[in-house]
């Protein structure tokens, strides 16, 4: 790899002169135009690239951002279609982690920033990451899905004011700007789709308050009251938990409904399988929509409609917000709009349709 000295020696100039021209600190007024052109031409000829590490050291910056991310689900091989249909798998692999990391990294690469990933699943694993969270090693941090206890730990640790942006943090910390999907819009989008498809007795499954608020908002906008008998604010998320709920409700309960909004694709999948195995036709009798637009949604015999939280865009926006913070700019919270992937579980068509 060529250096500033190589360019200087080739042109019989000082290293200082070459450095100032290529860094833009001199411009064209401090050196003859032909000298500037010669330096730039020689740099291109020698395939010179700025040494980011050396520049960072000189500037007192690391050009490195830490990403602390809650490891919610395993990242592994997707189950086969046969395994999905037969229900022969546990927690479905999720693409949420990959998508948010991809968005963050793409945004940071555009600013020539390096990234360090730290995964946590417990308070103990989170605490082990904290010693690296300081200005001598990082220029900033993006924290994904940390709970209130962990955020408090981070705030207490961050005595030197390291710039921090949070992702998906539901609680509002005035000192920590956040980027997240608009969760009330998630519930509203799913419910509105079922209403537009003709559903009038829409069941809600899930404990997330903000998504439930969106469900209520969509019903109210359409002139319907919330029926408490159709709302199940259970702290559940996975397929087997959906089965347990439906077995408790009994095989006759689906006759009271014509639509289901589930707060996760796993709950929607469990609902779909229970209904079909008990003789109910989806979507003819009951229409179903989940949340997350998981990879398995399109592999099912009855493809599953789902709200996509636009996670890549969330990650990309978080990286851009952090860069503004690092530059000393004031930023606020940002909500990213979800999208709806309409498939056969809530539509008479087998073609996927993406709706904003």
Image: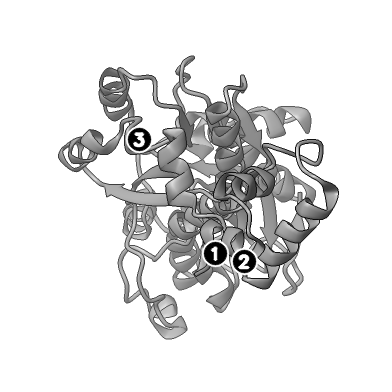
- Residue 95 x, y percent position in the rendering: 47, 61
Residue at the extreme right: 33
Which residue is depicted at the point 57% across and 44% down? 16
Indicate left or right for 95 with 137 as reference.
right
- Packing grade of label 1 (10 A; few <14, some 14-19, many >=20) is some
Residue named by callout 1: 6
From the viewer's side, name the closer residue of 292 and 86.
292
From the viewer's side, name the closer residue of 254 and 208.
208
Name the colouring of the figure: one colour
Are dots 3 and 1 in contact, CB under 8 Å?
Answer: no
Q: CA distance from mark 2 to mark 3?
A: 54 Å
- Residue 68 x, y percent position in the rendering: 35, 43
Which residue is depicted at the point 84% across and 49% down? 33
- Residue 317 in view of the camera: yes
Q: Quadrant of residue 341?
A: bottom right
Of helix, strand and loop, which one carries label 1?
helix
Are dots 2 and 1 in contact, CB under 8 Å?
Answer: yes
- Residue 254 x, y percent position in the rendering: 52, 54
Which residue is depicted at the point 76% across and 71% down? 349
Of helix, strand and loop, which one carries label 2?
helix
Residue at the extreme left: 124
From the viewer's side, name the closer residue of 102 and 239.
102
Residue named by callout 3: 146
- Residue 197 in view of the camera: no
Of helix, strand and loop, which one carries label 3?
loop
Q: CA distance from mark 2 to mark 1?
A: 6 Å
On residue 345, the disc is none
Residue named by callout 2: 10
């Amino acid at each position: 790899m060529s250096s500033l000295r190589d360019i200087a020696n080739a042109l019989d100039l000082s290293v200082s002169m070459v450095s100032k021209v290529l860094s833009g600190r001199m411009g064209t007024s401090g050196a003859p135009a032909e000298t500037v052109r010669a330096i730039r031409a020689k740099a291109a000829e020698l395939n010179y690239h700025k040494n980011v590490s050396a520049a960072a050291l000189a500037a007192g910056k690391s050009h490195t951002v830490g990403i602390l991310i809650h490891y919610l689900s395993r990242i592994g091989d997707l189950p086969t279609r046969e395994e999905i249909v037969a229900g022969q798998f546990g927690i479905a692999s999720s693409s949420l982690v990959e998508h948010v990391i991809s968005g963050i990294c793409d945004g940071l690469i555009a600013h020539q920033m390096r990234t360090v990933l730290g995964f946590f699943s417990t308070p103990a694993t989170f605490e082990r990451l904290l010693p690296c969270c300081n200005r001598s090693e990082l220029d900033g941090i993006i924290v994904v899905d940390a709970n209130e206890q962990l955020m408090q730990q981070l705030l207490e640790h961050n005595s030197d004011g390291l710039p921090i942006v949070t992702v998906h943090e539901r609680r509002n910390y005035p000192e920590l700007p956040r980027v997240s999907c608009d969760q009330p819009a998630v519930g509203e989008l799913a419910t509105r789709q079922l209403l537009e498809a003709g559903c009038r007795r829409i069941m809600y499954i899930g404990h997330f308050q903000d998504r439930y608020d969106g469900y209520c908002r969509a019903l109210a906008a359409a002139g319907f009251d919330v029926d408490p008998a159709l709302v199940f604010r259970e702290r559940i998320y996975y397929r087997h938990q959906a089965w347990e709920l439906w077995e408790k409700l009994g095989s006759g309960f689906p006759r009271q409904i014509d639509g289901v909004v589930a707060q996760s694709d796993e709950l929607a999948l469990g609902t779909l399988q229970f209904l079909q195995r008990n003789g109910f036709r989806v979507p003819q009798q009951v229409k179903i929509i989940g949340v997350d637009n998981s990879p398995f949604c399109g592999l099912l015999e009855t493809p599953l409609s789902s709200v996509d939280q636009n996670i890549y865009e969330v990650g990309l926006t978080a990286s851009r917000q952090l860069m503004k913070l690092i530059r000393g700019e004031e930023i606020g919270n940002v909500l990213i709009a979800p999208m709806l992937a309409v498939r056969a579980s809530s539509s008479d068509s087998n073609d996927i349709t993406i709706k904003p």
